Image (cartoon, rainbow, N blue to C red):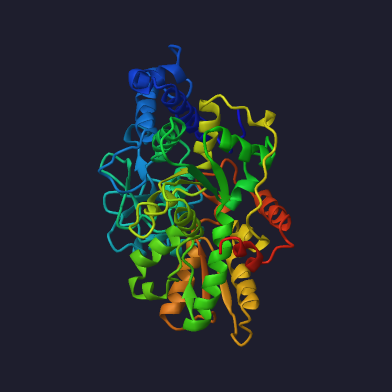
Amino acid sequence: MRKFDTKVQHLKYKVLKEVARLAFSGELLENVTDIPKMIVPGKEPTMRCCVYKERAILAERVKLAMGGDRSNPNVIEVIDIACDECPVVGYEITESCRGCIAHRCEDACPREAISFDHEQKAVIDKNKCIECGRCAKVCPYTAIISRKRPCENACKVKAISMNEDKTAKISNEKCVECGACVYQCPFGAIMDKSYILEVIDILKKSNNNEDYKVYAVVAPSISSQFTYAKLGQVIAGIKQLGFFSVVEAALGGDLVADSESRELSEKGFLTSSCCPAFVKYINHEFPDLSGNISHNLSPMALIGKYIKSREDKAKVVFIGPCTAKKSEIRKETVKPYIDSAITFEELQALFDGKGLDITTAAEDLLDNASYFGRIFARSGGLADAVRQGLKENGITDFDYKPLSCDGLEECRIALLKLRARKLDANFIEGMACRGGCIAGAGCLTHGEKDKDQVDKYGHEAYEKTIKDAISVLK
C-alpha cells in the first residue's frame, strides 16, 4: 500500500489503478463490470453493511474513474448511494441544557421552533427551524450547537446543500471545484471525475507511432509527494509511462512572475490568476471585481502555450494536486494549450496500473525553473515571486503591498474589503486551499511538512533568477 492520508483515498486509488491497468492492456471494456468484484472479491463486505451495496458504490466510482457524467460540467460529483451515513444536521440541544426557566432560546426563535419536555429541557422542531442560530447566541450555557456535515463544513462557498433524501447536492452556480469536500468526506461519497483514460489514450497513440510527442507539465508541489521515492525517480517513472519529456509548471510560474509584476506596476492593482478556484470564486461571488484579475494565464497554461509554440503536434498533460485544473483546461483560453489534466493520486494509479516500480528507476533530472517559480506551490510564494519580478524588471518606484490569502475564507474577507475600498494592499494572491497547492484535493499527502519540502526543492535552484530561468524560452 502506498502512502495516502486516508483509507478513502486508498479506495479511490484502487479503483483508478484497476481502470488504468485494464486500459493499458486493452481489456477495459470487456472487464469494466467486474472491477467491483476485483476490489471486493469475497462474500463479506469490507467497509459497508452489505457486500452488494459496497460493489454498487464501487461501480459508481468506476464510472467517475472513466470520466463521470459528461453532461455535468462540474468535475466534482456526488455518489448518492454512498452518501447515507451522516446524521441529520443543524442546531441541536446538547446535554448542557439545564432546563432553566429563563427560556431565552424560546424568546429568540422567530419561528416558534423551540418547546420544552417534561424536564424543561429545550427541544428543537426540525420542521420549523430555519437554522438562524439566534437560540445558540442567547443560551447562557452554550447548550445549543450547530452540527454540519463534513462536506458542508469543508465548502467555504456554501455550494453544498441536502436533497430531500438527505444526500449531498452540489450547486454548479456556486461550486469553484476546489475539491475540499472530496478530501473531507469520510465516506468518499463526493469525488472528482477522472480523465485518466483520456491520458492513457494519448500515451498509447503516441507510443503507436502517431506523429506527436507527449509532454508532462508537473506542478511544483510534486516535490512534497511520492515520499517513498526520490523526485528524480518520479520524473523517470513519468517518462516510462510514455511521456516524451517532463517540464516544470514552475517555469510557467517564472513567466507569470515576470509578466505579472510588470502588469501590476502598470495597472496599480491586481488579483492573481494562478488558482482557477480563486478566479472562479471572484467571477461567481464578486463579478464587479472581475476586472481586477490579472490577464496572465496560469503557469500551467503559459508553459503549455510555450511548448506548443515550439512543437506543432505536441500534446500536453498537466499533473498536479488540483481538481479545479480539470475544469480550467476546458476554458476557451486554455484548452488550445493543455490537452488533459490528472492529479497526483491518478499519477500513482498510472504507475501501478502499468506495473512500474519507480523506486528501482535511475533518477532523472528536472531543472527548468527558479526558486521563485517553484515556491508558487505554497501560500505566499506567488507574492514573493512578484516582488522578485519587480526587482528584476528594475521597477523600483512601485510601492508593493501584497496580501496573501490562505484559503477561500481569507479571500472573501480581502475581496469584501476591496469592494468597500478599505483594503490596504495592491496585490491579492488568492489560494483556495489552505496552505496553497500543497493542500490540493488531489495530493497524496497533506501536511505542514509539505511546505518545507517545497522550500527545500526551491532552494535547489536558488542561484537562478527569474530572468535566468525564462531566458531559455526566448
Residue 436 appears at what percent x and percent y? Answer: 56, 57
Quadrant hosting residue 76: top left
Where 401 falls versus 62 (above or below)?
A: below
Q: Is residue 247 something that shows in the picture?
A: yes
Placement of the C terminus among the 4 image quadrants: bottom right
Q: Is residue 7 left or right of residue 174?
A: right
Frontmost residue, 219 versus 49? 219
Q: Residue furthest top?
A: 43
- The outermost residue toward the bottom is 397
Where does the image place residue 221, in percent across and percent down from the top left? 60, 50
Residue 268 can be seen in this image: no
Tell me: 429 left or right of 327: right
Q: Nearer the viewer, residue 51 or 120?
A: 51
> Which residue shows up at 43% across the image and 70% down it?
295
Q: Position of residue 32 (x, y in %)?
A: 36, 22
Residue 469: x percent and y percent?
A: 63, 62
Is 167 in front, or is 360? 360
How many numbered discs, if any? 0
User: Which residue is depicted at the point 57% across and 45% down?
Assistant: 246
Report whether 435 appears left or right of 300. right
Front residue (pair 366, 124):
366
**Residue at left offset 51%, top offset 59%:** 299
Q: Quadrant of the N terminus?
A: top right
